[in-house]
Image: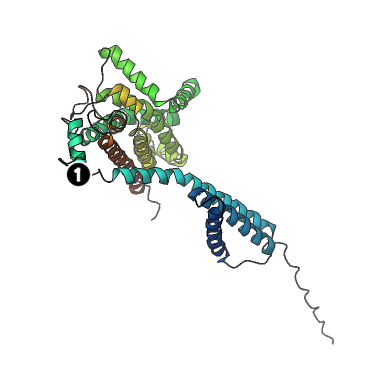
Amino acid sequence: MSVATKPPATPAAPSSLAHNQLPRYTTQVVLVLSIAAGAGLSALFGGFSPVSFAVLSVLVFGVVNTTLAGIVEGRRKAVDKLVTTFVYTAFGIALVPLISVIWSVLDNGAERFSIDFLTTSMRNVTGLNDQQALEGAAPFIGGAYHAILGTFLITGLATIISVPIGLLTSIYLVEYGRGRLARSITFFVDVMTGIPSIVAGLFAAALFAVLFGVGTRNGFAGAVALSVLMIPVVVRSSEEMLRIVPNELREAAYALGVPKWRTIVRVVVPTAISGIASGVTLAIARVVGETAPLIVTAGFTSSINSDPFSDWMMSLPAYVYSQAMRPLSGSSPEPSFDRAWAAALTLILIVMLLNLVARLIARLFAPKTGR
């Protein structure tokens, strides 16, 4: 009895996607060589400069990296390397203004930034004091305590006004809004999102001029102006967070006989509270540096004012503007510029702190998915 023999297996055809591969360290080596070549070419063509060095290094890296990938790994990898180079280059270009601003503020404001600057106001500070400080007869005086206090009071009042209005509006749009009214509210929220900040300041100034007389300026007027800018941001962020709450949670509550308002209060809002709190904090960070509305509504002062409903109130953005654009007479403008840079550094630190708080809130209130 003969046993049938199995024919030998034919080797599989090579895949069209299989290509040779460059070593993993090729990109790093090409990057180092491109930096060296960029520095040499920049020095060769008219002297070394950071801009020409960066441009030439990127060009050399893109050409060499893409060419090597095309020769060894094929066209697909070459296109991938080229697009990756474009993406990282765009990311680096986007970082340049940010790093430049932060570096400028740190370089110019760190020297004047101190505990004394944070705990003193500009009351009784004149150009004569600055001149004595420049001559070494007296230390630099004058700080931004009154502006920091005004910023916190005005922004806090704006938050108290904006958050309930914005949150209730978003709840209406998501849970109840239907028809022409909901579409109209959405349209006007979109319009408010794009209005210039000076328009919000002029609106608040005109409103208080009608209600309390022409020339009325105080911290509460500034808070009203900032709330006009905050409300659409709060509405949009809260609306998006409420829309991503699964409908199954609502339907489960309705099946148990829970009223709709109680479902919203006990189920929907707690589920979305992490995103809502994060959006509110980012909205605060967005308006805390607004200058034009506060100049129009809150004005300028060199004294400490803890009552936002009475008299003018200084804020950090207005303080930076006044010190940079209106230095104290009788002295060199250098001390005023130093105070402006230190106040700008303080404002950046406050915004950074608010963003960190937003991330912390989002992490703490995030729904727990594990068992």
Q: Is residue 24 above or below residue 309?
A: below
Q: Residue at x 28, y 46 (%)?
A: 110
Q: Is residue 100 above or below residue 42?
A: above
* Percent x, y of residue 14: 74, 67
Quarter of the figure with the N terminus: bottom right
Residue at the outermost bottom position: 1
Q: Amino acid at mark 1?
A: Ile
- In this rendering, position of residue 81 left or right of residue 264: right
Pick the front one: 250 or 33 = 33
Tell me the SS state at disc 1.
helix
- In this rendering, position of residue 335 left or right of residue 97: left
Colouring scheme, one of rainbow, by chain, secondary structure, one colour: rainbow
- In this rendering, position of residue 72 left or right of residue 200: right
Q: Residue at x 19, y 39 (%)?
A: 133
Q: Which residue is mark 1?
A: 115
* Percent x, y of residue 73: 67, 63
Pick the front one: 68 or 160 = 68
Pick the front one: 29 or 186 = 29
* Percent x, y of residue 339: 26, 37
